[in-house]
């Protein structure tokens, strides 16, 4: 029973079906339970929350990531799946504490000043939550001081910065410099991403990591987290 529900949750994440009204990528899915209905059913049946997250949601997004890498899926497909996982995580959030789940760490994410693009950041936020991290999303068009203040107040282990414009990505370096001047740089790992950003640029501004897409960003955070735990 448990494995059947988990399997269906995973399958519907891959299909990008939030509710029973969604079509999904394959035909004939309308009317069948989507992720929200299945998560509700799983909770009612007493399925352990870690199983829902790890074996249903996270495993589903891993499959989506593989399909994205092989060009079988495109951004709209990934967004649909990410939306399903995001809503499911909101449903599960009240149950996390009582299930004894501890987060892997906290990450503050933001799109830098002057940049209104947030699709990539939103995908990363959802994937991080699904992977067991606590995420504080500051939004887009966020100035340097607000980000520095958030690092000081939230005390995250990670800071994720996004930019889609070459004219705004320079703010990432300004933020790292401001963290240094505030005595906070050694307390947080900085990961950057976005279309104009590169591994070389990340090194040039002193960032700790770079993610070319949402899935690579998660891999970088997981790697840095493993190193932090050593």
Image (cartoon, rainbow, N blue to C red):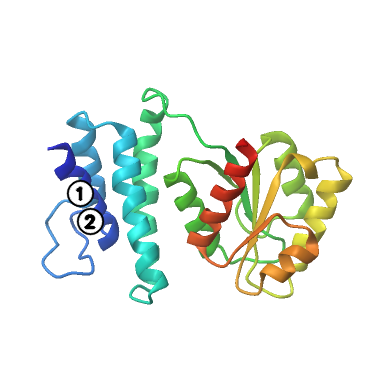
**Could you classify mark 1 by the number of other residues whose Cα lies within 10 Å: few (under 14), some (14-19), or many (20 or more)?**
some
* Along the viewing direction, whichever of 94 and 51 lies nearer the viewer: 51
Tell me residue 63's x, y (percent).
Answer: 33, 60
How many numbered dots are placed on residues in this image?
Answer: 2
Determine the secondary structure under disc 1: helix
User: In the rendered image of this protein, does residue 15 appear above or below residue 43?
Assistant: below
Q: Does residue 35 appear anywhere in the picture?
A: yes
Residue 221: x and y, percent?
57, 50
Residue 43 percent coordinates (x, y): 24, 33
Q: Position of 173 compared to 82: left or right?
A: right
Can you identify the residue that label 1 sits on? 7
> Looking at this view, is 134 or 144 the one in front?
134
Q: Residue at x 80, y 41 (%)?
A: 184
Residue bearing the label numbered 2: 11
Q: Which mark is residue 172?
A: none
Q: In the rendered view, would you say 121 is above or below 170?
A: above
| Relative to 134, 80 lies left or right | left
Q: Residue at x 71, y 41 (%)?
A: 151
**Quadrant position of the C terminus in the picture:** top right
Cα–Cα gap, marks 1 and 2: 6 Å
Q: Is residue 153 above or below residue 112?
A: above
Q: Position of residue 12 (x, y in %)?
A: 23, 56
Q: Are marks 1 and 2 in contact (CB under 8 Å)?
A: yes
Question: Would residue 74 appear left or right of 219 to someone viewing this image?
Answer: left
Q: Residue at x 19, y 50 (%)?
A: 8
Looking at the image, residue 112 sits to the left or right of residue 33; the answer is right
Q: 10 Å neighbourhood of mark 2: few (<14), some, or many (≥20)?
A: many
- Report if residue 16 is visible in the image: no
Q: Quadrant of the N terminus?
A: top left
């Amino acid at each position: 029973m448990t494995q059947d529900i988990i399997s269906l949750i995973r399958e519907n994440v891959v299909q990008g079906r939030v509710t029973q009204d969604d079509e999904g990528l394959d035909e004939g899915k309308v009317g069948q339970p989507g992720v929200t209905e299945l998560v509700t059913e799983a909770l009612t049946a007493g399925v352990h929350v870690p199983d829902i997250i790890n074996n249903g949601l996270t495993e589903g997004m891993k499959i989506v990531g593989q399909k994205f890498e092989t060009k079988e899926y495109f951004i709209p497909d990934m967004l649909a799946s990410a939306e399903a996982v995001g809503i499911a995580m909101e449903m599960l959030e009240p149950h996390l504490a009582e299930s004894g789940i501890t987060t892997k760490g906290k990450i503050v994410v933001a799109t830098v000043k002057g940049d209104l693009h947030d699709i990539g950041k939103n995908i990363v936020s959802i994937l991080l939550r699904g992977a067991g991290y606590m995420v504080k999303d500051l939004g887009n068009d966020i100035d340097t001081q607000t980000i520095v203040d958030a690092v000081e107040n939230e005390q995250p282990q990670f800071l994720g910065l996004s930019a889609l414009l070459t004219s705004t990505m320079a703010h990432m370096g300004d933020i790292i410099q401001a963290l240094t001047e505030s005595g906070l740089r050694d307390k947080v790992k900085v990961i950057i991403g976005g279309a104009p950003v590169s591994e070389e640029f990340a090194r040039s501004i002193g960032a700790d990591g770079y993610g070319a897409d949402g899935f690579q960003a998660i891999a970088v955070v997981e790697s840095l987290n493993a190193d932090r735990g050593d």
